[in-house]
Image (spheres, rainbow, N blue to C red):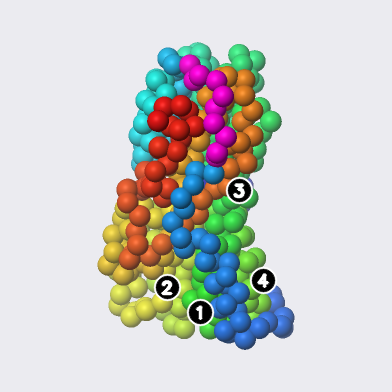
Amino acid sequence: MSTRIRRRGAAAALAVCVAIGLAACGSSDETANASQGTSDEIKAQAQQLVSTYTKQPTSIGVTEPIKGTIPTGKRIAYMNTGLSSAVEIEAILKEALDAVGWQLVSVNVGLTPEKLKAGWEQAVRLKPDGVIGVGFGPEYFSQELDQLKAMKIPVVEVSLAKNDPRLTALFQGVEQVTRAGEIQAAWTLAQHGSDAKTVAVDVPDLESVHAWFTGFSNEYKRLCPNCKLDKIQFAATDMGTPKTASQLAGYVQAHPDTNTIMMAVASLALGLPDALAPLGYKGSIGVLNADEAIRDYMRKGQVTVSNSTDWATTVWLTVDTLARSFLGESVEPDLKAPLNYYLYTGENIPAGKGYATAYVADYQAQFKKLWGKS
């Protein structure tokens, strides 16, 4: 997920929600008079949209082989924030780089603007052959990006709020995260039809999370204009803290007819099953990109569904892009590759852990075939 900070008062907004009643912060009244189909019609339409994503993907989305011979010995700088997700991504990246005979150079960029800039300054000094970053955009290292471009060093980014013409490629942008929200909205209505009574979680100061919420809420209201949809807003600093579970449980206690809780970030659901247990909540809980903690909840039947984007394929795709760039070949085959989404429950959790999950079971073999390494 993108970690670019939006300049909005999420914490203040949450306080307002609590003060005036959380239902007032939702969008359930905005289309209350709109017409809609029967519950069965809503379920059928939503299920038709969902069906594509309940089948485990089988293709990496790129079929055009690299024409030239991939050079060995390249040094690739990976801008590592130190987050657990970044560490998992680095392990995936190392496997891909090993497959083409390249060296991984891990650069610690931290999470603050000062550390980010210092990390990218270090990348410039290292003069690597290519750079891969995740989550933080050029607004934090614009000068360094100019320098890398002048040095003809390709830079590939993943999960940013906005693209930048100085980047060689961007994968998992806001549009794709928005689509993930739409898919989760369709799943919700395929389950509950017009009986859906949903609360969705927004983190407005994280642009990609807000994009997910926008996609979710717009698709939800498109499919079922009169269905109840409320929202709870948290600040980015609330993620992974007991506050999120406590506040969501408070909402459910105040709205006992709630039958769906949806969110974009797995850490927002930490502790939620325990917080809801005294309330006897029997509804659905869904997240985007479940980590191992949330998967444990899923195995126990405490979290219902995860909609996941295919990070393993995306990380290998960044290496494919660099290889094509080094050879002077077009990177369009990569840019046109569709992002895989996969909706799964506790009964069909795919193999692998966290970001290293192989949603496309043989994704490594498919890439190696493109690279002439099979």
- The kind of residue tagged 2 is Ser
Query: Residue tagged by mark 2?
Result: 284
Q: Quadrant of residue 242?
A: bottom left
Percent across and percent down for residue 154 are 58, 23
Could you say which disc has been placed on residue 265 in the image? Answer: none
Mark 4, residues whose alpha carbon is within 10 Å: few (<14), some, or many (≥20)? Answer: some
Residue underneath mark 4: 222
Q: Amino acid at mark 3?
A: Val
**In the visual, does 251 lie left or right of 19?**
left
- The reply to whether callout 4 and callout 3 are in contact (CB within 8 Å) is no
Q: Which mark is residue 192?
A: 1
Of the residues shown, which amino acid type is indicated by label 1? His
Mark sitting earlier along the chain (4/1): 1
Q: Is residue 69 magenta?
A: yes
Task: Check residue 164 for magenta coloring.
Answer: no
| Whether residue 130 is situated above or below residue 355 in the rendered picture | above
**Do residues under tags 1 and 2 come within 8 Å of each other at their CB atoms?**
yes
Q: How many marks?
A: 4
Badge nearest the viewer, 1 or 3: 1
Q: Earlier in the sequence, mark 4 or mark 3?
A: 3
Q: Which residues are magenta?
A: 62-71
Residue occupying image coordinates x 60% and y 70%: 220
User: Alpha carbon of mark 4 to alpha carbon of mark 3: how far?
Assistant: 20 Å
Locate residue 28, reporting x and y percent: 62, 76
Farthest residue to the right: give it.
34
Q: Position of residue 321 (x, y in %)?
A: 55, 30
Residue at x 50% of width, y 36% of height: 317
Is tag 4's residue or tag 2's residue first in the polypeptide sequence? 4
**Residue linked to disc 3:** 174
Q: Nearer the viewer, residue 212 or 298?
A: 298
- Near mark 1 (Cα within 10 A), the count class, few <14, some 14-19 or many ≥20, is many
Q: Does any portion of residue 172 appear in the rendered image? A: no
